[in-house]
Image (tube, coloured by chain):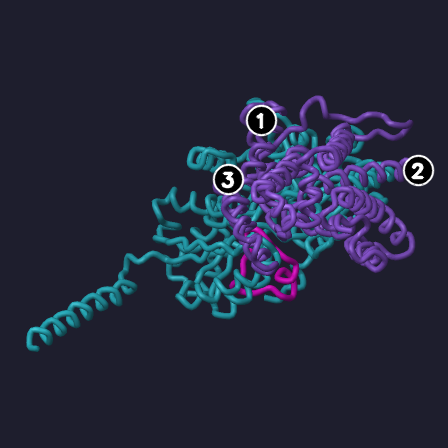
Chain colours: A cyan, B purple
Amino acid sequence: MRTRITAFTLGLTAATALSGVLLAAPADAADPLRIGFITTLSTPAGYIGEDERDGFKLAITQEDGKLGGVPVELVVEDDALKPANAKQIAERMTGEGIRLFTGVNFSNVISAVAPTVLKTGAFYVSLNPGPSVFAGGGCSPNYFVASYQNDNFHEAGGLAANELGYKKVVILAPNYQAGRDALEGFKRTYKGQVVSEIYTKLDQTDFSVELARIRSAAPDAIYQFHPGGAGINFAKQYANSGLAKEIPMVLPVFSMDARMMAATGDAAEGYYIASNWSAGLDNPANKDFVAAFEKTYGRKPTIYAAQAYDTAKLIASGLDKVDGDIEKQDAFRAALKAADFTSVRGSFAFGQNQHPILDWYLMRVERGADGQLAQTVVRKVATAMQDAYAAECKM
Amino acid sequence: MSTLLIEQILNGLQYGAMLFLLASGLTLIFGIMGVINLTHGSFYMVGAFCAAYAATATGSFAAAVLAALVGAGLYGLVMELVVIRRLYARDHLDQVLATFGMILFTNELVSVVFGRTPPFMDIPSFLTGTVALLPGLSYPVVRLAFILVGAVVAVGLWLLITRTRIGMLIRAGADDRAMVDALGVDIRRLFSLVFALGAVLCGLAGVMTAPLLAVEIGMGERILITTFVVIVVGGVGSVRGAAVGALIVGMIDSLGRAYIPITLYELLPPEIASTLAAGLVSASIYVAMAAILLVRPRGLLPARG
């Protein structure tokens, strides 16, 4: 009996000591700042989340596990492109005390994650979507978009079509919120005539019917927004139907990112693209980034990787100024807003709604010196363009 | 206007040909073995991935065809031996659950084996470009080839089923499984064979769509529901029914997608017209199915009298 009690006491003591060590751990000064990174890693869009994670991680690796001199830990979770999943993950992460978030790729997912994060007083910095609801009246002090405001892309597309001198176009997009916004954005800046506005089904893979309608409308050019697999199909079928030779295509870079270009093969050659970044964009920060990304991961970065890298650099500039103490909210906010970092996209500044003011380019898919297809800058179509919603933001 | 109509009819034939390749196997499996096999679309995906992988590795279209047929056929056979075989005696709910699980399994397996990046397959050079069918109407060669392959397979299956001993057993099995079993035919081997044949036909559809459409995880689920509509319209268990059903669904879809929006856009503003047209187009094949089932509850050409 006595030995049993001793054993019990001993065990209890050991357990107490152990839990004491565990409890003490979070108070350690060298404990890294945790950053919640919720993104899409499964589903056909999974490659997008991979590129975002890898682009963000590259910036951390380059600083040996730090951002702006502050040790960080990236907590990555897959949302499987489901807003409900993402919201749940965000709630769990905020419960675990994470105070800084990024990573979401889709507009419908960020609409669930951002409010969840912001209502706990934490920070959200977007590395891709910039839905209009959070850019105007719905703007928020702790919400930053390091990538772009959604409409800007298609406004740049409209400007590109103007520059190319196309007088009448057919425009196409899937029939959902982002698709309708895309065509609205295009029409906001395009000066010519839209002869036909075609909405496709969101999960459509065969565009034979739409191609026949384009052929019968005989426009000067088409503008289409189909991200992911649908975009690959569209480009391939467009080329194979012979239409690519007759009617040029203008498209935002989501309809033809670097991975899609590899998947589409020769079909992409000659297409015009509106974008704020390409691997060939001529500035030193970008050249370093592209080289480092290719060396680390053995593949070409997409625009998603570039934007994630920029987001990491922006966060680094903020952390640096507050020595990693993001509970000094006003100081951290001001530090982020100053955007004191060198963007791989060249110029970068925040508007008062904390969405970026960027330069936009018209690019063409051409074969580079290495025989590989690349997005070559033709000319700049907009300098320091601000979004249409900034004025509505009272902050 | 008339060239648009002819082009849409060709598009309908082409879509119908692809649906037929998927539906003929599914209807045999459903009709003869009584198994609701939701994994059928996965064989199509496996075929497409094998084709794209082989085409990238070897640069040869023949290798891609071979890889798709063998890959999808083998995967189907393994699936039958390991999973489906245990489901014959179970009720339909068990079959739906088990085969739905196999969809998820196959999606993961394919992404583990081939990676998440969708592989790319070129249209083989002899099928690229267009041919001028009429003045002002040129049509992609690859889509014409699609229609031709669908027709050849339809004739081939018809010969197999009406002119061979295996075909006779398949027909008999569809009518009365117990009787065929009692006559001393190894019905299990026949089932495995039919199942593998269905998977091979999916592989064929996969290799043909791989260069035209994107190869991606989950591509099979999208087409599966339409394939079920085809076999319900045509009559479960009947290959002739699958052919007729595929043609009807293909035509309704192509003509509907072209003419419903064009008509509505002339009457309504684009935002309303687009939403309404999209709804009507999606609903059109189901409305047609309901109408046909009202008149012929067992489908147009059911297998069992």
The amino acid sitting under disc 2 is Ser
Which marked residue is nearer to the observer: mark 1 or mark 3? 3
Q: Earlier along the polypeptide chain: callout 2 or callout 3?
A: 2
Q: Secondary structure at mark 1?
A: loop
Mark 1 to mark 3: distance in Å?
Answer: 22 Å
Q: Please report the bounds of the magenta region as a residue range.
A: A128-146
Circle number at residue A372: 1
Per the image, the residue denoted by label 3 is B115
The amino acid sitting under disc 1 is Gln
x, y percent for residue A228: 63, 44
Mark 2 to mark 1: distance in Å?
Answer: 42 Å
x, y percent for residue B84: 55, 49
Q: Tell me, yes or no, whether dots 1 and 3 are on the same chain.
A: no
x, y percent for residue A18: 20, 65
x, y percent for residue B166: 66, 36
Task: Find out whether residue A136 is within the magenta segment.
Answer: yes
